[in-house]
Image (cartoon, rainbow, N blue to C red):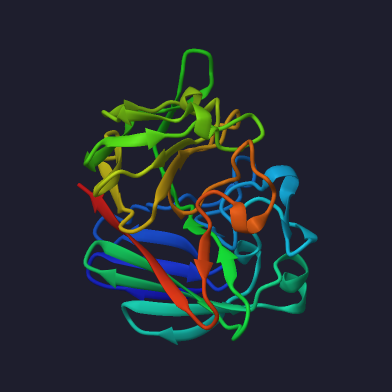
Amino acid sequence: MVTLSNDDLTVKINEWGAELSSVEDKQTGYEFMWQADEDYWGRHAPVLFPIVGRLKNDQYEYQGKTYEMNQHGFARDMLFNVEEVKEDSATFSLTETEETLEKYPFKFQLFITYTLEEKHLTVTYEVKNTSNEEEMYYGIGGHPAFNVSQTTDDEGQLEYDQVSFNFDGNDEHLFIPLSQEGYIQLDEAEKQTVEEKQLTHESFVNDAFVYKLEGDTEMVLTDAANQVQVRLNPKDMTHVGVWSSYPARGGFVCLEPWASTADKEQASGKLEEKYAINQLAPEASKSHEYTIEFIKE
């Protein structure tokens, strides 16, 4: 576990999956991050690479060959190398292996840098195509889960207590529904003005809220009971998701910045035709970045 620290926050990142695992407020001891209870959802903030979401039938075709890959890809379940650690930043790396090439036939380097500045944590993904001949296709994204308060309702069920979500800045975005299988339904997408949403577990009965971003904005999660606000600036990430477990009633909500999405219902299955896929020329690289601000009153 790698630890970053300043006067405001203590941040811990696990080398396994390069996963952000803890963000603690130094003044109050409050833990912002969900602590991975297997009864609800056993992760903190997995890195989604080389796909985001689900592939149609959990497979894709590339250059005439069919490959199988589970939801969100393999990076979250691999040990990263620690490249550099400073008091306020840390960089991790992942490179292809014989096992990844069986699922994903590309040579790559993935660098993830966490940078702490006051109450802000910036996450930077740098994806490099290390082949000098082949183009590379990929998706990448974050899946951080934040603690929210719960109480017991009249029926004895756990329920969120005074939790809400909104966009700050431009609040009109393209809402993209998900099918029961977890594929995006582009034919049913529509622009919505997203005003403050009061969240309950029932909010996620149809899985995540998915938006294609239109203009600059921040995702804001407010837990009035705990006097906590988490503000996530997606920056150049093209899509975002808001999710929590259902029907399991975990005390967390995820704000997810993505550069790609799940397959659409009508996907051809060919990787190069996948909706919102990223493409890299041989030996090229690209960075994707988002910032989270942690506020405890």
The residue located at (29%, 34%) in the rendering is 225
Is residue 162 something one can see in this rendering? no
Residue 267 seen in render: yes
In the displayed structure, does residue 285 sit left or right of residue 23? right
Q: Is residue 215 left or right of residue 191?
A: left
Give the residue drawn at x 66%, y 63%: 74
Name the residue rendered at 64%, 29% in the picture. 180
Q: Position of residue 220 (x, y in %)?
A: 29, 42
Question: Does residue 232 sit above or below 121 in this rendering?
Answer: above
Q: Is residue 114 above or below residue 191?
A: below
Residue 260 in percent (x, y) is at 50, 53
Q: Residue at x 68, y 54 (%)?
A: 270
Q: Position of residue 23 (x, y in %)?
A: 38, 60
State the image coordinates of residue 92 (x, y, percent, origin top left).
Answer: 49, 78
Establish if 54 lies above or below 246.
below
Picture quadrant of residue 150:
top left
- In front of the other: 293 or 240: 240
Height in image: 261 above or below 125? above
User: Farthest residue toward the top?
Assistant: 154
Q: Nearer the viewer, residue 282 or 22?
A: 282
Q: Nearer the viewer, residue 83 or 160?
A: 83
- Viewer-side residue, 234 vs 86: 234
Q: Which image quadrant for residue 132?
A: bottom right
The number of numbered badges drawn on the structure is 0
